[in-house]
Image (spheres, rainbow, N blue to C red):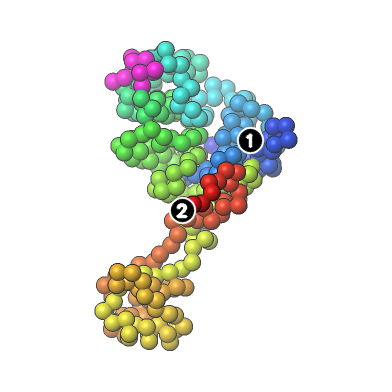
Amino acid sequence: MNSIEIRRLTKEYGATRAVDRLGFDVLPGRVTGFLGPNGAGKSTTMRLLLGLDRPTSGTATIGGRAFTDLTEPLHHVGALLDAQAAHGGRTGRDHLLALAASNRIPVRRVDEVMEQAGIGSAARKRIKTYSLGMRQRLGIAAALLGDPGVLLLDEPTNGLDPEGIIWIRELMRSLAAEGRTVLVSSHLMSETASFVDHLVVLGRGRLLADTSMKEFIDARSTPRVRLRTSDPIRLRATLARDGLELIEAAEGRWTVDGAQAEQIGALAAREGIPMFELSDERASLEQAYLDLTADHAEFAATPR
């Protein structure tokens, strides 16, 4: 199995508990967003999962096995934690060749992933000459090198141009569609909303949410319909009979709280009331996220 299993995971640094009895699963076949304010424990959890640090207690395993117990781990797990970690004096190709040799990965795979990441033409250039976006692509290429069943990506769109952002978005979706496990940490809510299926949200080292993105947003949204009509007087009277109120909004639009577009559309059609616009309003991922994590942010600016 390619699943990630976190069980009562705890990590303490002196008197600070960075991860606090954390427990969740990351399943194959979907892209899971790993969210939380700065200091929430996301990076610590990923480091513990990859054996870069030891837990105070609890376990973090991949398919029931610790990362450190995996033979040739790049065949099982690919990770991008820090795109700046590659040695600047090496060429991009040499960096990947060293990783490939350590895990008995064929040389041809190095060239394949560099082309896949769009940096094949820079293969023999030194990494210190790479832009931030190129280093990011190199890090993603390294994560893909062993054709792993599990991908851990920390801020994968950092430094990428619009074409690169679209590429990594489609890549993550395609990897999940192939039955792989994809865990993505990001602070960009609007971008995250475009590719994740499931969310795991942390706050001060504890689990705040483990749910589908739709359920996460719906749980923090008040149903509301936005509409335009040429006959608001008749529509107001019609809605009132069902205990609903038509509220005037900006730019000739109206809203109805506590209802859905399908319901309002059926009532208007029954009475023959023209509708020029009719849509459900729901919170964005960013709004829902801020609503949940407002009391769990370690650092927050003072409003003006």
Towards the viewer: 70 or 60? 60
Number of the label disc, if any, that sits on residue 302: none
Residue identified by numbered label 2? 285
Towards the viewer: 90 or 141? 90
Q: What residue type is labelled 2?
A: Leu
Give the percent coordinates (x, y) of residue 201.
Answer: 56, 47
Q: Which amino acid does label 1 sit on?
A: Ala
Number of the label disc, if any, that sits on residue 60: 1
The answer to whether residue 78 of the structure is visible from this angle is no
**Kind of element beneath mark 1:** strand
Towards the viewer: 183 or 155? 155
Crowding around mark 2 (Cα neighbors within 10 Å: few <14, some 14 to 19, many 20+) is many
Q: In this view, does 257 lie to the left or right of 211?
A: left
Query: For residue 276, which quarter of the picture?
Result: bottom left
Instruction: Say if the magenta span includes residue 36.
Output: no
Q: Is residue 20 left or right of residue 107?
A: right
Residue drawn at x 36%, y 25% is 131
Residue drawn at x 69%, y 38% is 17
* Residues at circles 2 and 1 in contact by the CB criterion of under 8 Å: no
Q: Is residue 238 above or below residue 43?
A: below
Residue drawn at x 36%, y 78% is 266
Which residues fall within the magenta stretch? 121-130
